[in-house]
Amino acid sequence: MALKTTLWDPSEYLDSPESIAAYLEAAFDDGDPALIAAALGDIARAMGMTQLASRAGVTREALYKALSATGDPRLSTFLGVMKALGIKLTPRAA
């Protein structure tokens, strides 16, 4: 009998500001822009894409596109999403 698996969806576990911040911090630590965009996409789905897009000042379609696997969000979109999520970026020396 074949082993049956289910797809793991991180957005199901992003249910608190602390879990969201930890997830995003891990993506930033990796440093891959595509991974950061994907993590933001997971967070946006957890929060509600339509509501987050409205709070970030972009359309839902634009947010889906920017945070897709092939997306490359503009800095203004990225900062709008971060602000809408209530997450503050703090630069620190590497």
Image (tube, rainbow, N blue to C red):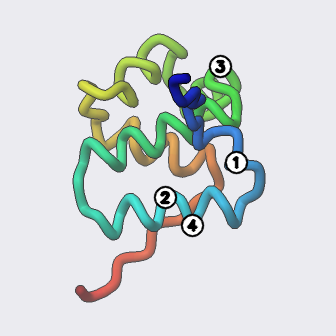
Residue at 45%, 20% in the rendered image: 64
Between disc 2 and disc 3, the foreground one is 2
Report the disc number at residue 60.
none
Report the disc number at residue 24.
2
Determine the secondary structure under disc 4: helix
Disc 1 residue type (three-letter):
Tyr
Disc 2 residue type (three-letter):
Leu
Between disc 1 and disc 3, the foreground one is 1
**Which residue is under mark 4?**
22
From the image, which quarter does the N terminus lie in?
Answer: top right
Residue at 33%, 70% in the rendered image: 29
Residue 93, how many percent across, how many down? 26, 88
**For the residues marked 2 and 4, what is the alpha-carbon distance in whole angstroms?**
5 Å
Disc 4 residue type (three-letter):
Ala
**For the residues marked 3 and 4, what is the alpha-carbon distance in whole angstroms?**
23 Å
Q: Is residue 14 above or below residue 53?
A: below
Q: Is residue 65 left or right of residue 88?
A: left
Contact check, label 2 and label 4, Cβ < 8 Å: yes
**Which residue is under mark 3?**
50
Disc 3 residue type (three-letter):
Thr
Residue 65, how many percent across, how many down? 37, 18
**Which residue is under mark 1?**
13
Name the foreground residue: 74 vs 4.
4
Residue 32, how many percent across, how many down? 23, 54
Q: Is residue 61 left or right of residue 16?
A: left
**For the residues marked 2 and 3, what is the alpha-carbon distance in whole angstroms?**
20 Å
Between disc 3 and disc 4, the foreground one is 4
Mark 1 is surrounded, within 10 Å at the Cα level, by few (under 14), some (14 to 19) or many (20 or more) other residues, namely: some
Mark 4 is surrounded, within 10 Å at the Cα level, by few (under 14), some (14 to 19) or many (20 or more) other residues, namely: few
Residue 7, how many percent across, how many down? 55, 30
Mark 3 is surrounded, within 10 Å at the Cα level, by few (under 14), some (14 to 19) or many (20 or more) other residues, namely: some
